[in-house]
Image (cartoon, rainbow, N blue to C red):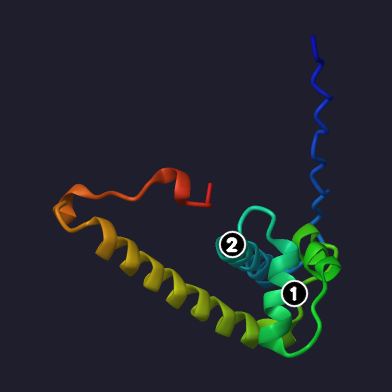
């Protein structure tokens, strides 16, 4: 008989948004949504790399983590690179959706397709 190793419970970071303005909180949520949509569930490292490329300045995982926890606000200087990145991601998602439609929706009426709830990252 083999015993399964204990599973390590993932620790959620403590979030304290008390030092952020409403605008900074909104930007934080937008960054989280963009990161999750563009890079998946464990998004922060890959997102930092994407943003580094878009902003043409280093953005580290630690910085992104600080934005998520509310320790620091997203710098205003990154607002424009974030917007460009968001639009590029949106364009890529549209292209991917078009490819899927072309591959799979040939015989299904458009009225018969509904979005899957499980693909929506928002609560």
Query: Measured from the top left, where is residue 18 in percent x and y?
Result: 80, 59
Query: Measured from the top left, where is residue 62 in percent x and y?
Result: 86, 66
Of the two numbered discs 1 and 2 on the same chain, state the one appearing first in sequence: 2
- For the point 67% across and 67% down, the residue is 22
Quarter containing the N terminus: top right
- Picture layout, residue 13 above or below residue 39: above
Question: 6 or 17: which is nearer to us?
Answer: 6
- For the point 59% across and 62% down, the residue is 33
Circle 1 crowding by C-alpha within 10 Å: few under 14, some 14–19, many from 20: many
- Circles 1 and 2, Cβ within 8 Å, touching? The answer is no
Query: Is label 1 in a helix, a strand or a loop?
Result: loop
Query: Measured from the top left, where is residue 14 in percent x and y?
Result: 83, 48
Q: Looking at this rendering, what residue extends furthest in the bottom direction?
A: 56
Identify the image quadrant of residue 100.
Answer: bottom left
Question: 77 or 104: which is nearer to us?
Answer: 104
The number of numbered badges drawn on the structure is: 2
Query: Measured from the top left, where is residue 69 in percent x and y?
Result: 80, 58
Q: Which residue is mark 1?
A: 74
In this rendering, position of residue 80 left or right of residue 44: left
Identify the image quadrant of residue 44.
Answer: bottom right
Q: Nearer the viewer, mark 1 or mark 2?
A: 2
- Picture layout, residue 87 above or below residue 100: below
Q: Looking at this rendering, what residue extends furthest in the front direction?
A: 1
| Label ID, residue 33 | 2
Circle 2 crowding by C-alpha within 10 Å: few under 14, some 14–19, many from 20: some
Query: Is label 2 in a helix, a strand or a loop?
Result: helix
Query: In whole angstroms, how far apart are the C-alphas of marks 1 and 2?
Result: 14 Å
In this rendering, position of residue 99 left or right of residue 123: left
- For the point 82% across and 16% down, the residue is 3
In this rendering, position of residue 99 left or right of residue 113: right
């Amino acid at each position: 008989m083999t015993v399964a190793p204990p599973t390590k419970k993932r620790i959620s970071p403590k979030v304290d948004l008390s030092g952020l303005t409403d605008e900074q909180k909104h930007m934080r949520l937008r960054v989280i949504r963009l990161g999750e949509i563009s890079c998946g569930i464990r998004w922060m490292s890959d997102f930092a790399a994407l943003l580094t490329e878009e902003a043409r300045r280093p953005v580290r995982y630690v910085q992104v983590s600080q934005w998520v926890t509310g320790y620091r606000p997203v710098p205003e200087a990154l607002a424009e690179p974030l917007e460009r990145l968001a639009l590029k991601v949106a364009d890529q998602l549209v292209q991917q959706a078009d490819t899927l439609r072309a591959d799979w929706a040939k015989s299904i009426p458009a009225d018969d397709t509904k979005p899957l709830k499980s693909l929506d990252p928002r609560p």
